[in-house]
Amino acid sequence: KAGVTQTPRYLIKTRGQQVTLSCSPISGHRSVSWYQQTPGQGLQFLFEYFSETQRNKGNFPGRFSGRQFSNSRSEMNVSTLELGDSALYLCASSFYSRNMDSGANVLTFGAGSRLTVL
Amino acid sequence: AQSVTQLGSHVSVSEGALVLLRCNYSSSVPPYLFWYVQYPNQGLQLLLKYTSAATLVKGINGFEAEFKKSETSFHLTKPSAHMSDAAEYFCAVSGYNQGGKLIFGQGTELSVKP
């Protein structure tokens, strides 16, 4: 069973540009969550998508956005990049079961996309 | 609001020694608790989770954790450290209907000396 696939793995952008990151979840997983990981702030939740709808949202500015497609693949976009956006962006997918509270879901993470903003 | 505190950003042990990584949580409702491990240039891998069943949870690679409500703790232990255990470890908390929204601790980097 293929894992969570994130592309690209590494990218370099300059301030003011925008970037789009892609995430393909594990087959059968309909929930996709995104996290930002930095040395200073640690792991912070960005947002979660389920069945093409944003289900949860973290405390990030509107420059950070995402979407999910009908095949559960997800993209996140960061516009007007700032130096502080340099980070490892992690995507995680999970299986949704009606018989279990979603808070107990296990997230399976991808290897991440490392963004450097110059 | 939920939060997680991991005591000690760096822990160093000798190979074969006990590993103890500390995690305390704050939650107004019964929490779900997780330990993840991250190796360099990789994503996070689940070690174990607590979801209100047994308070002593066994995970992969010989790790286990005990949920202690009275101490609001969920410390991770392993009886005998191996060189391959060197990595960063994250404790995380979730709650009812939170889906993919985990609150992570700041992480503890584990070093294992030969």
Image (spheres, coloured by chain):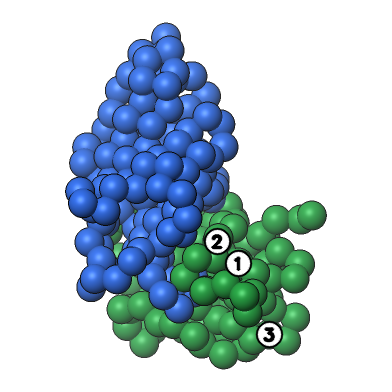
Chain colours: A green, B blue
Tag 2–tag 3 contact (CB < 8 Å): no
Q: Nearer the viewer, mark 2 or mark 3?
A: 2
Q: Is residue B24 left or right of residue A55?
A: left
Number of marks in picture:
3
Residue named by callout 2: A107
Tag 1–tag 2 contact (CB < 8 Å): yes
> As rendered, which of B99 and B9 lies closer to the eye?
B99
| Chain letter for the residue marked with disc 3 in the picture | A
Q: Residues within 10 Å of mark 3 (few under 14, many from 20)?
A: few
Q: Is residue A72 visible?
A: yes
Helix, strand, or loop for circle 2?
Answer: loop
| Chain letter for the residue marked with disc 2 in the picture | A
Identify the image quadrant of residue B92. Answer: bottom left
Question: Looking at the image, which residue sits at the far top?
Answer: B114
Q: Is residue B104 left or right of residue B83?
A: left
For the residue marked with disc 3, what is the amino acid?
Phe
Residue named by callout 1: A93
Marks 3 and 1, the one that precedes in the sequence: 3
Q: Residues within 10 Å of mark 1 (few under 14, many from 20)?
A: many
| Chain letter for the residue marked with disc 1 in the picture | A
Helix, strand, or loop for circle 3?
Answer: loop
Residue named by callout 3: A69
| Distance of label 3 from label 1 (alpha carbons) | 14 Å
Q: Indicate whether B60 appears above or below A14.
A: above
Q: Residues within 10 Å of mark 2 (few under 14, many from 20)?
A: many
Q: Nearer the viewer, mark 3 or mark 1?
A: 1
| Distance of label 2 from label 3 (alpha carbons) | 19 Å
Q: Residue at x 40, y 47 (%)?
A: B55
Q: Residue at x 47, y 43 (%)?
A: B57
Helix, strand, or loop for circle 1?
Answer: strand
